[in-house]
Amino acid sequence: MELSVVVSTLNDRERLLSSLDALTERTPPSTEIVVVNGPSSDGTTGVVRERSDVDVLVEISERNPNVSRNAGLRAATGDVVAFIDGEYVVEPSWYDAIERSLTDEVDVVTGPVTGSGIDSDLRTPKTVARRAVTYFHGDNTAFDRTVLEALDGFDEYLETGGACDCAHRVAGLGFDVDWDAEMATRCEVGTDGGRADRDWGETYRSRSYRLAKNYGLRPTVVGRVTGSALRDAVAGIRGVVSGNETPSGWLGDGGAVVTNAARGLRDGLRARWTDRTTQRNPNGLSKRHDRAVRVYDRR
């Protein structure tokens, strides 16, 4: 197995260094490490260029994780490509889990990320429009390269939920996804107060876009978006009653949900029309070549 690891980072230099240290210690020397940075302003470029264990450093100008993944994929040469975020540290069993799963003819393998805030059970497939979809954590997943080529990478329209969209397309193309508990990483949230509050507008634009793009405007799609919005609205009301949220904030979030859900449905249907193949990726890897602002390649 020739493994390339794409590590995405943005203004998180100290945790990136811990992530790279763990990769160097816990993967074979032949592992290709590609760091995609940007646009950081904390000196990440300088410290990464000083490291001999990083094969390629790609600088990008867009704060979009799917642009970062595609930029790394374009630079990677391995027949297996893994994606992790620079704040995550791989466990000692991580490499062996990937090798074991992909040698057993699995197409995609993922595993747990301790401290990521993802509490859904990724091991259980979900049925969407009579299609069994196995979701995976986009920042701890390894693909056989042929899968990524068939998908044309990630959809860069999405600023969030890119891994969910990818999971729908993986299922649509008939590839297998395996969950291995030993393909584990850790996410240690720093002292900055943790993660930012959810952007409800972006969340619903992404959700409605990927459902409309992959399945069309069918009752199942509308029902899933509407049902999810109603559940979140009820949770928001509970927050208002308990004093954890203001009525004006709840109304503002509600307006953002409605506006962006409608926009996502429109854009998803347009994307479905643009790419009527089973690939369903009109904004993929092959569609542009200007992601990288600068590339430092020491191979």
Image: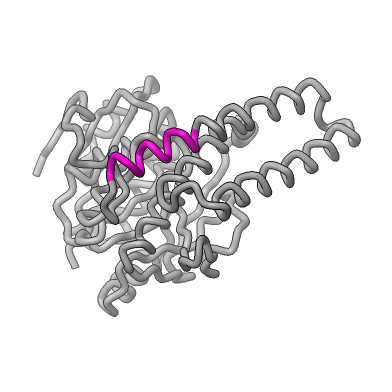
- Residue 12 lies in the magenta-colored region: no
Identify whether 25 is placed above or below 289: below
Identify whether 283 is placed above or below 221: above
Pick out the residue farthest to the front: 218
Residue 88 position, x and y percent, is 45, 48
Q: Which residues are magenta?
A: 264-275
- The residue lying at 37 percent from left, 66 percent from top is 109
Res 139 seen here: no
Residue 57 position, x and y percent, is 22, 35
Residue 25 position, x and y percent, is 32, 57
Q: Depth check: 112 or 90 in front?
A: 112
Q: Main secondary structure of the magenta part?
A: helix
Tell me the quarter of the picture where residue 162 sits: top left
Pick out the residue farthest to the right: 241
Q: Depth check: 292 or 22 in front?
A: 292
Q: Depth check: 233 or 36 in front?
A: 233
Q: Quadrant of the N terminus?
A: bottom left
Q: Quadrant of the C terminus?
A: top left
- The residue lying at 30 percent from left, 23 percent from top is 61
Tell me the quarter of the picture where residue 141 sits: bottom left
- The residue lying at 52 percent from left, 42 percent from top is 208
